[in-house]
Amino acid sequence: MGNYYQPEIETMPREQIRKLQNERLLKQVRHAWNDVPYYRKKMQEKGLTPDDIKSMDDLHLLPFLTKADLREAYPYGLMGRPLKDCVRIQSTSGTTGQRVVAFYTLNDIHIWETMCARAIMAAGGTNEDVVQVSYGYGLFTGGPGLNGGSHLVGSLTIPASSGNTDRQIMFIKDLSATILCCTPSYAAFIGERMKEMGMSPDDIPLKAGIFGAEAWSESMRRDIESTMGIKAYDIYGLTELCGPGVSFECSDQHGMHINEDYFIAEIIDPETGEVLPEGSDGELVFTTLEKEAFPLIRYRTRDITSLSHEPCPCGRTHVRMSRLKGRTDDMLIIRGVNVFPSQIETVLINQGYPANYQIIVDRVNNTDTLDVRVEMTPEMFTDNLGVVNQRQAKLVEGLRSMLGLTAKVTLVAPKSITRSEGKAVRVIDNRKI
Amino acid sequence: MSVKQISVFLENRPGCLHEMTKALAEAKIDLRGLSLAETSDFGIVRLIVDDVAGTATTLRDAGFVASLTDVLAVEVPNVPGGLNSVLEVLNGAGINVEYMYAILGNKKSDTAYMIFRVNDNAKASSSLTASGIKIMGAEELSAI
């Protein structure tokens, strides 16, 4: 049978899950109404009070929350608890209005780590394992989430954080890490480096990897699995909701189980907002059920996926979401970092470049590349190669500081960026995912 | 005394340099001097021409970014140590040479002509002139 962290919850019969969700939804809606004036106002605009929500069947009546709401309410406007009750913030990488800051009470942290513990055990983890967490630590949720989950499982945790690949490999080898947690592209990178160092899967004790924070394909999964000799598991989450662990793969690897005791998931038509029947592709919407500091009702993720209640051979009864099939907005996920074209535009304009640019994203050797093509202008051009080079380097640094990513900047001739129907094509994503 | 150099931004892409020379050829622009500086990403072509305004317009119409820079056109004795004597003067005056290149001059074989891009044109001119080195203006340059 399966390896569960909380078998009674993870394999709970459907009707009991639904009962639990009903009870928790009513409480969460009341919490939002009482403690989050921003959301109460949204409900009032629709003529709703908490009394109108009698069960999950009424969920569709409630107004959505979007990233625009998060931006408008930044930083404290969606909090459901006073600051004195909060113990942590986590944040996405954006340094402009796109930044998401989420608040946690101690209980919120505990719930988040519980979900990560379930994910680790679904990947076969136990207290006998050594879990190397090579996600970034800090504001990014990857490191802290899996770190906490690993503690709850009782695994020996190596908080390696990302970077310094040779040292990562040394830890895996010397400390006999059995489970690796990081972004899939970093896993692929570590795997390539191992190969270069002449190591085969037999030289390392790893048996599983938990990889998330960016989209990846089945073929990339197979590559990583064969290079490292492991089984690779997908994990999903958003900073807004907590971080990684919102859903995770089991050994069956047919979709990710959403922790339904903590969230209700819906699939909607992104155009009309209508709830779609099970199995349809649409925008994933989450309602938190137990969040204290940052309750979100019907939060639109912009991720496109579908849901399935088909019984899973692993024994878990929680609904599964398929691999992500795309986004409804222009957000790109590059090496696990959320990137909006508008952030790149801001840097260009600040440095005196025209807003005529093109972003080319590709995946080379399983690692994302970001190339920003910028049109040269008479104002930015001089006869001095060194000065043009310096300006180019300053742009690379500006982008790095805005995005937290190193981009390649290519200067191109004026009016050379393709325009279709008079409008420039801003993003070319050549990744085959 | 200085002359105008036209600098042109070139993408690092096959055919880009040819597109420029084609545009100049069609406009019947006579090139007197040329130098190319490049990085792995892009290049800068510096041109010396007789018709500066016409060349700038031609390039702009052909979609190139170009800029004008004041540079010094210097007569250099076409003998061993000729260039060295010019640089000795500039060095002595504390002038920094950013780049330089030779240009065409067919009439007098005992004289070579070089373009100097320096950090202080006025000071460089007066030092060179005081040392008996000739700096040419646009008309003299056209005549060589």
Image (spheres, helix red, strand yellow):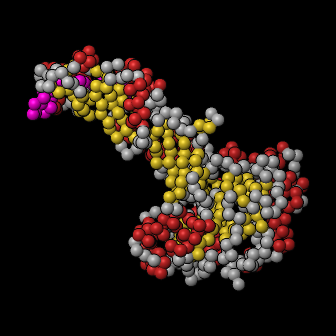
Q: Nearer the viewer, residue A67 or A328?
A: A328
Q: Name the spot of residue A391 as percent of width and height, x first.
A: 41, 39
Outermost residue on the top side: it is B139
Residue at the image position 45 percent from the left and 40 percent from the top = A411
Instruction: State whether residue B4 is above or below residue B17.
Output: above
Residue at the image position 37 percent from the left and 22 percent from the top = B28
Say whether residue A275 is visible: yes
Q: Quadrant of residue A426?
A: top right
| Quadrant (top left/top right/bottom left/bottom right) for the C terminus of chain A | bottom right
Q: Name the spot of residue A240 as percent of width and height, x first.
A: 67, 56
Residue at the image position 48 percent from the left and 78 percent from the top = A201
| Quadrant (top left/top right/bottom left/bottom right) for the N terminus of chain A | bottom right
Instruction: State whether residue B21 is above or below residue A112.
Output: above
Magenta segment, which residues?
B67-86
Q: Nearer the viewer, residue A256 or A220?
A: A220
Residue at the image position 62 percent from the left and 52 percent from the top = A101
